[in-house]
Image: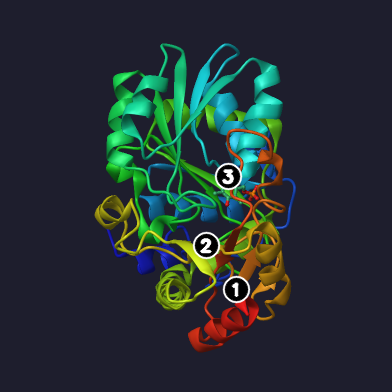
Amino acid sequence: MTGFATRAIHAGQDPDPHSGSVIVPIHATSTFVQDGVGELRNGYEYSRGANPTRTALETCLAALEGGRFGRAFASGMAATDVLLRAICRPGDHLVIPDDAYGGTFRLIDKVLRSWGIEYTAVSQSDLPAVRAAMRPTTRVLWCETPSNPLLAIADIAALAGIAHESGARLVVDNTFATPYLQAPLGLGADVVLHSTTKYLGGHSDVIGGALITDDAEVDEQVAFLQKSAGAVPGPFDAWLTLRGIKTLAVRMERHCDNAERVVAALQTHPTVGDVHYPGSETHPGHEVAAKQMRRFGGMVSFTVRGGAEAALAVCARAQLFTLAESLGGVESLIEHPGRMTHASTAGTQLEVPPDLIRLSVGIEDAEDLIDDLRTALG
Ligand SMILES: *Cc1c(COP(=O)(O)O)cnc(C)c1O
């Protein structure tokens, strides 16, 4: 297998055999000509089922995660919904992280629960607690590492062992780490999920999701639901995501460099409380992160002294760090999880600290980012 950056630029992206176009064309078509009834030219029939631009993206995603099967979706949540409905039936049980992505938690708690799915939320860095939460009906152990927004680290290989002992599958939401920094399938995970909206797309200009697996049974169910429910990305969206992926390796190196500089500045600032970054030697998950990740990513969260009011004021004063939800783009973003991305967890077991601020550290000049944070912190 070629190196990561080579795969990102070439996997699934051979020059177009018809025109010679070096870049995969945007196949803006809903349907494909048949040479006779049921005689498809290149296997394409109707774009909900498959479209060549989407195929290029799916092939590339599978190559990046080192999996046999890749499927692209209209959003990360569409991928999550399809995956859980592909694997679970009413009465089945899930074990999810107690700091799961807010949208994932909302889908499971508000939508899938009414469909008869049960769940237990536990801290995934607490392996005995995870093991104790597994039931005979548990179909999926869901893992996010690093987690959102607290950057907790879960040991993927250990979780795979626990899932498989119970006859369940381990799903890893690899959105924060990206396949450049972490390869869950190689550590024993059964399925990798992405919100390609974030680092894979990388430019905050397109929403998308993906599922990658080596498990033919799961992929067959996923492909069936992808086609039957139709939450697919259009060819323009698939093309934009593919364009973003080409630079993933260089972007991630710079995101990591800048995050390390920002963390060092925050750690010595008098109004900053806890800084959460798995690259810090004091982070409780540092050792596991160092074992399973190439570097530690571009996401950082921290608390400020003075509670929610102080945290909101810092978000309001930041200039270069744009106040917005989402993450993983070239530009730096700041947000208040308690009032923004994680507002739906208020009053639940998954509620986040009110004085927490989350940064998506972009690839601007590190000095400018640090100056902006110092001003915002006052
Ligand atoms: C954004 C995100 C999702 C959801 O993806 P969408 O593309 O917004 O639907 C899922 N998991 C994580 C970790 C995310 O950051």
In the picture, the disc for residue 302 is 2
Q: What colouring style does the render use?
A: rainbow
Dot 1 or dot 2: first in sequence order is 2
The image position of residue 134, as x and y in percent, is: 40, 20
Please tell me whether residue 70 is drawn above or below residue 356 in the rendered image.
above
* Label tally: 3
Which amino acid is tagged 1? Ser
Picture residue at 58% right of the left edge, 59% below the top: 198
The image position of residue 135, as x and y in percent, is: 42, 14
Whether the residue under disc 1 has CB within 8 Å of ligand 1: no
Name which quarter of the figure residue 37 lies in: top right
Whole-number angstrom distance, CA of label 1 to CA of label 2: 15 Å
Dot 1 or dot 3: first in sequence order is 3
Determine the secondary structure under disc 2.
strand
Position of 53 with respect to 156 (left or right) is: right
The image position of residue 74, as x and y in percent, is: 67, 47
Query: On the image, numbered disc 1 is attached to which residue?
Result: 332
In the picture, the disc for residue 101 is 3
Which amino acid is tagged 3? Tyr
